[in-house]
Image: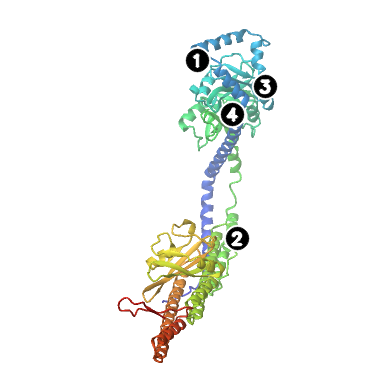
Amino acid sequence: MQAIQQPKISIFSSVRTQLVIVSIFAVIIAVLITQFVTISTTQNEVEKGANSNLAAIANSSSVAISNLLSEQVALLQVLTDNRGLELRARQQSESYGSDLEEVREQIQEIDGQWAISADNSPLVQGILNRDASTSLRQFQVNFPNQVEVFATDSYGALVAATARTSDYDQSDEEWWLRAWNNGNGALYIDRRIQLDASTGVYGLIIAVPIEDANGVVGVLRATYSLSSIQTLVDNSQFGETGHIALVNSDGEVLAVPGFIGGDIVLDEFRELLLNQDETAPDELTVIADENELQAVVQFSRISSGGTFSALDELGWYVLALQEEKEALAPVNESLNAVVVPVVAIVLVMILISFLLARRLTSPLTKMRQAAQQLINQQWETRVDVKERNELGELAYTFNVMAGQLQAFVDEMDSRIQEQTRDLRAVIDVSNQISNLLDPNRLLQDVVDLTKERFRLYHAHIYLLDEEGEILMLAAGAGHVGRQMVSEQRRISLQNLTSVVATAGRTRESVIINDVELSETFLPHPLLPDTRSELAVPLIARGQLVGVLDVQSDQIDYFTEQTLTVLETLGNQISVAISNATLYQVAERTSRHEQALSSIAQRLQGATNVDEVLQVAVRELGKALRVPHTAIQLDMTENEGSPIKG
């Protein structure tokens, strides 16, 4: 690999020197053109500042008025949930007949009586003294800006009211028709400010449907006094001539400081809306205000942000206005401070350039030193740079990279240690079982050691029967494993829902790292905490011997690394089982041959049949290690009885 040479940094090639040179050159160029651009720049900035200030005032005032109106709508909607009001509206709506014309005639007749009845008449008092009316008056006490509140049924007839209304039948009113909305219900807010005939105040009509579980049963209508909005408008004056105005999309002035109504029209604002598509202009815009004076303007539309569509469609705007001469006064003031000594600027900027270059290159120096320490394998090295700029981000990235590198090195060390530990465990298990020739002890030691050394929840071994069809549990770790063995647990090799059978059938290891998500996991009540499972086929001399099944109480416990180690252990176990089995077979064969030889020798000394039979029975019982042995000989040629011994 080609060697990498470290570059040598000279005084002129250093980043610090280059930054200083570039800064000085930039300062000289900037000073030369400053006088040319200062005036226009100052004017633009002042105009932008005035525009931004007016826009902020318009936006904040718009939000405040929107919140006031949204709050009133929300209060009325809460009021419609009054159970007594809903019930009264429902009962009165259902009290009429089914003929709509007769219902209208009945309501109009009452409306005529209402118009000529005195305030203390039973008709009027009957409405005003209802519990629903009392609830409305209590609402009015709590929220005095609601100067008039009343409710109608589904036909527009009066149901409850805080005070006597001018009409009993409200079904011909626009607000009622819009709020009733053919029985579908809808929020209604009048876009005009009107002098209410019943209350004698300028207010805003708001109507909301009254609904119960079965649908719309009436309409609640309130006249909201605009005194709070007028107070907000009066208190929003700024500077000497700055103020806000509440205007609708037709240019009608709804409220300005000291005035509320709709007699003044701002034609230029209406044209501005048409040209700007209801969006506040980005450039400085001048229109004639309510006093016919030229004023800089910014505006913001009243909106609930989608909460109440009727409020969003109201078409009201808040205008922030300031006379042009006051708004642009800073332009003339700033011109007096523009001209400064060029030499002083250059000297100051040169000094600043040196200081700034030093400050900017200091983090780079720290990072270069830290990088050298990383080269020397000092993995804990970090850069202490706290600048809130790109260099700070670069230092942060360097520290993250160094942390990741250290974590990678630590992880590799951990993996190596873990692999070493696992391989040592395999060697320990192999060493301890290599000299065991008793299959039963061998299997029990294997599962106990495997569970202990690999920190497993459980381990057991299944052996394949002689027919090669059934996997029988031969050994299990600990008390639980022995109890499971005593249950004579058996699994068919063709069982498609068993991890153990799948591993034996396919002769490939099977990992389930989350048993709750697996369809091939067979739970056992003695192992309730199993969360992951690994089954390793035990194959010796090309033949399936059994399956090593290990379980963990952790999800995702078994990795490819674990699989490799346990498969290696499985190979060792397979060989050990095969060797122990072969040894057991050889030992049994040898013992039988010795027994036969002994029997043959003793039979040679027998002198008659009875003695032969007695010797054979006695020696066979000893060889076979059974408590009782019998021999029956059939020595009859035709009908004789057999001879027993």
Element type where label 3 sits in the image: helix
Task: Evaluate if marks 1 and 4 touch, with contact meaning CB atoms under 8 Å apart.
Answer: no
Q: How is the image coloured?
A: rainbow
N-terminal-most mark, 3 or 4: 4
N-terminal-most mark, 1 or 2: 1
N-terminal-most mark, 1 or 4: 4
* Quarter the C terminus occupies: bottom left
Residue at the disc numbered 4: 77
| Residue 252 image-quadrant placement | top right
Q: Amino acid at mark 2?
A: Lys
Q: Amino acid at mark 4?
A: Gln
N-terminal-most mark, 3 or 2: 3
Rate crowding at label 1 as few (under 14), some (14 to 19) or many (20 or more) other CA atoms within 10 Å.
few
Q: Nearer the viewer, mark 1 or mark 4?
A: 1
Query: Which mark identifies residue 134?
Result: 3
Element type where label 1 sits in the image: loop
Residue at the disc numbered 2: 386
Tell me if residue 399 comes above or below residue 373 in the rendering: above
Element type where label 4 sits in the image: helix
Q: Could you tell me how far apart the alpha carbons at marks 3 and 4 are, in whole angstroms?
A: 17 Å
N-terminal-most mark, 1 or 3: 1
Rate crowding at label 4 as few (under 14), some (14 to 19) or many (20 or more) other CA atoms within 10 Å.
some
Q: From this viewpoint, is residue 14 visible?
A: no
Tell me if residue 135 comes above or below residue 301 in the rendering: above
Rate crowding at label 3 as few (under 14), some (14 to 19) or many (20 or more) other CA atoms within 10 Å.
some
Residue at the disc numbered 1: 98
Q: Could you tell me how far apart the alpha carbons at marks 1 and 3 are, in whole angstroms?
A: 30 Å
Q: Residue 606: x, y in percent? A: 41, 90
